[in-house]
Image: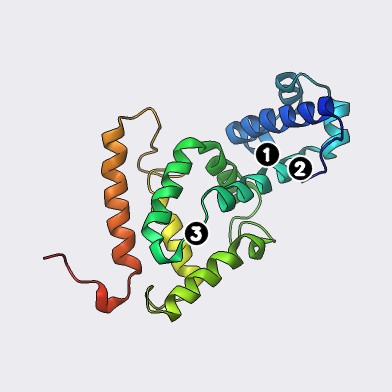
Amino acid sequence: MPEQPPTSRGAATYQRILDAATEEFAQHGIAGARIERIVAAARTNKAQLYGYFGDKERLFDAIFLSSLERITNVVPIDADDLADWAVRLYDEYLRRPDLIRLATWTRLERRPTGHLVETHQHYDDRKLTAIAEAQAAGRVREGDPFDLMALVIAMSMAWSPVSNVYAASNQEPDDVHDQRRVLLRDCVRRATVPRDQDQPDR
C-alpha cells in the first residue's frame, strides 16, 4: 500500500479514493474501471489520485492487496476448527462481496492459472503452518496443507459472488444463512477430520 498522506485532510481524500476505487474495480474490473468515475465519486482530481497511487494498475494493486490483508486479519484461521473458519469466511463474503469480485477480476484479467498473487506466501504461510501443526497433532487429516486450505476456502465460497450456481446476499432471511452455515460446517468437518474420526453420527 502507498504511504498515507500525513495530514488529516489528505488522509481523508486518500480513503475516499480507496473506497470509490474499490467499488469501481469490483463492478467493472481493471480494464473497465474509469479514473474519471473514481475521482468524481471521491470528490478529488486525477492529479491527486496519481500523486498518491501512480496509475490505475497500481491503484488496483493497493486495493486488492488491502482486501487480502483484510481477509487474513478479520477472519484468522483456526486450524483446530476449520469448519468454523469456513463459516466465518462465508459471513465475511456476505459483508464484503466486493472483496471476492476483486479476486475474480484478478483471475480473469491477470492470472488465469497458478497463485493469485506473487506474494502469496505472505498471506498463506501462517495458514499452512497452522494446518501442518494440526495435522502433526492428529487433529486434521493427512494431505498437502495447501490443498486442504484451498478446499476449505472453496467450500466457504459455494454461495459467494463467484458461484456459477447461486450468489448469496445479506438481504436473504437469517434462517436461510443459518441452514447454509450448518451444512457448510458439517461438510468441512467431514472433509478435514482424520479418517479414523470421520464416522457417521449415531
- Residue that mark 2 sits on: 57
Q: Secondary structure at mark 2?
A: helix
Callout in the foreground (3, 2):
3
Q: Give the residue displayed 15% in from the left and 64% down from the top.
A: 201
Q: Earlier in the sequence, mark 2 or mark 1?
A: 1
Residue 2: x %, y % from top left = 81, 44
- Residue that mark 3 sits on: 77
State the image quarter where residue 46 is shown.
top right
State the image quarter where residue 28 is shown.
top right
Q: Residues within 10 Å of mark 2 (few under 14, many from 20)?
A: few
Question: Depth check: 109 or 53 in front?
Answer: 53
Instruction: Identify the amino acid type marked 3.
Output: Ile
Left or right, 8 with respect to 73, comes to right
Query: Could you say which disc has been placed on residue 30 in the image?
Result: 1
Callout in the foreground (3, 1):
3
Q: Earlier in the sequence, mark 3 or mark 1?
A: 1
State the image quarter where residue 155 is shown.
bottom left
Q: CA distance from mark 2 to mark 1?
A: 7 Å
Q: Give the residue displayed 38% in from the left and 43% down from the top.
A: 159
As drawn, 170 above or below 160: above
Instruction: Identify the amino acid type marked 1.
Output: Ile
Q: Secondary structure at mark 1?
A: helix
